[in-house]
Image (cartoon, rainbow, N blue to C red):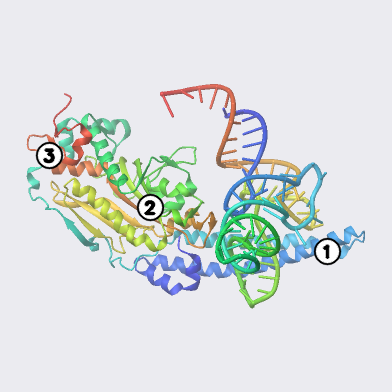
Amino acid sequence: MIDLDLIRKDPATVTANLARRRKPVYIDLLNEVRQKDTEWRACLQGADLLRRRRNELSHQIAESRSKGTPAPELDAEAKGIPDELREVEARETELLHGRDALLRRLPNLMDDSVPYGVDDSENVVVAKWGEPSPDGASRKSHAEVLEGLGMADFDRGRRASGAGFYYLLGSMVLLDLALQRFALDLLAGRGFTPVSPPYMLRRAPYEGVTDLADFENVMYKIENEDLYLIATSEHPLAALYLGEILDEDRLPIRLAGVSPCFRKEIGGHGVDQKGIFRVHQFQKVEQFVFCRPEESPTILEELRANAEEVFRQLRVPYRVVNVCTGDLGTVAAKKYDIEAWFPRQQAFREVVSCSNCTDYQSRRLGIRLGKAGRPGKLVPHTLNSTAVATSRGLAVILEQYQQPDGSLTIPDVLRPYLGGRTSLTREGS
RNA sequence: GCUGAGGUAGCCUAGCCCGGCAAGGCGCCAGCCUUGAAAGCUGGUGGCGUUCGCGCCACGGGAGUUCAAAUCUCCCCCUCAGCGCCA
């Protein structure tokens, strides 16, 4: 949520920033917010005046009655106020709620370093690592490797739960866990506290952390409960300090979330290919940070460096893109995607999303900065980044490390987590 | 799921039965005092609006009764405890 104070004091800056998103609807929204705000303030003054008169009369009535000298003319005037006030108040709350509802639909203000562009084709590559292997044609898709190894069952997954669900089997489960443990250990070594969060959230905190439009398209809802399955541990981690005052001296707070993630994504791309690249359920290790406003740009680079380190140590070639204005999500002020090289597809595909959400989530969640338990004027910044998602992390390893005989070489850094094993071969019948 | 107890400012609490300016403590800030600090004393310490005089609001949320609601009535939410169920 954009700071309303900024909208009032410097609407030109806000307008210019929103214009870079290339969606005129946001400018209309902003103007509506400003108009409703002006109307609301005028209306509030009217209501305050009525309430003031009511308070005065109440005191006078109380005084005259205590003296035993009733004043019927005061009673008469006082009796008229509630009806009048009810009307003004109804309009006042309507304006206020209308303004706030619109305000919450505005996206975050973007950092100046976000490149101007229409869609993902205009994202700017800012870094590359490793040599993309050119021998795609001779390789199998990650799904074929999985099935060849006997370590996934997509057909039965569909039958039991529908398209987009799968069973992982045998040693692939251990590799999945190894990948998570590897990422978690890396982060723990860099000052992150591991967190196993709730896998469901109430709606109110959920509206604080995400784009409201996501509810229809992405979220799984628990029937007859005010609960949603989390789409990423970013969301419960952001809600960890819901409504609290964070002591400035305790910041930055670095958290490493580990959880399954649940996504419908019916509005977007759907489930587009066999395998585990885009699925309804996967595991993810996530970086999340609460920090002081001035340090969030530096911490964004720190999170990006950590995520890059995961893929470097796995020896998977990748590139980093600075996501352009037209492709940036609602909540982020700036976002890097890390795109790993998938040799079979001969393409870079997104495996990490690394965002600075500035004060957008904190303000919506009612999280404030303070000292010694007292609230200050500022709200903390929040940032999040994938460390590794084991659907896509596994998929790229399966493409990168597959052998011509159908076996899978295990990346060096994962071997300690698999009892020193160096490769996986076919299991089961 | 049942029963009970609760939700008051950054935190803790009183007020509720019996309607009339939300009291007190802690913490924090400032001043006094002190070489400095602590203690002590004094004052301050929320949100919104503002014509900067001030006004309004704030007791989990909403509705109602009333000139007037933390207080009375109704509905809802949440937390805790006990019981039940349970990996």
Return the residue at label 1: A60
**Position of residue A277 measured from the top left corner of the image (x, y, whole percent):** 24, 44
Residue at (31%, 35%) from the top-left corner?
A162
Category of crowding for the residue at label 3, using alpha-carbon neighbours closer than 10 angstroms: few (below 14), some (14–19), many (at least 20): many
Q: Chain under label 3?
A: A
Q: Quadrant of residue A382?
A: bottom left
Residue type for callout 1: Gln
Category of crowding for the residue at label 1, using alpha-carbon neighbours closer than 10 angstroms: few (below 14), some (14–19), many (at least 20): some
Real-space CA distance between mark 3 and mark 1, rounded to the nearest whole angstrom: 87 Å
Q: Is residue A158 above or below residue A125?
A: above
**Position of residue A57 measured from the top left corner of the image (x, y, whole percent):** 80, 64
**Position of residue B29 measured from the top left corner of the image (x, y, whole percent):** 57, 63
Q: Which mark is residue A402?
A: 3
Q: Secondary structure at mark 2?
A: strand
Pair 3/2: label in front: 2
Q: Which mark is residue A289?
A: 2
B78 left or right, relative to A250: right
Q: Secondary structure at mark 3?
A: loop
Q: Earlier in the sequence, mark 3 or mark 1?
A: 1
Residue A19 shows up from this direction: yes
Residue type for callout 3: Gln
Q: Chain under label 1?
A: A
Real-space CA distance between mark 3 and mark 2, rounded to the nearest whole angstrom: 35 Å
Q: Is residue A94 above or below residue A278?
A: below
Q: How many marks?
A: 3
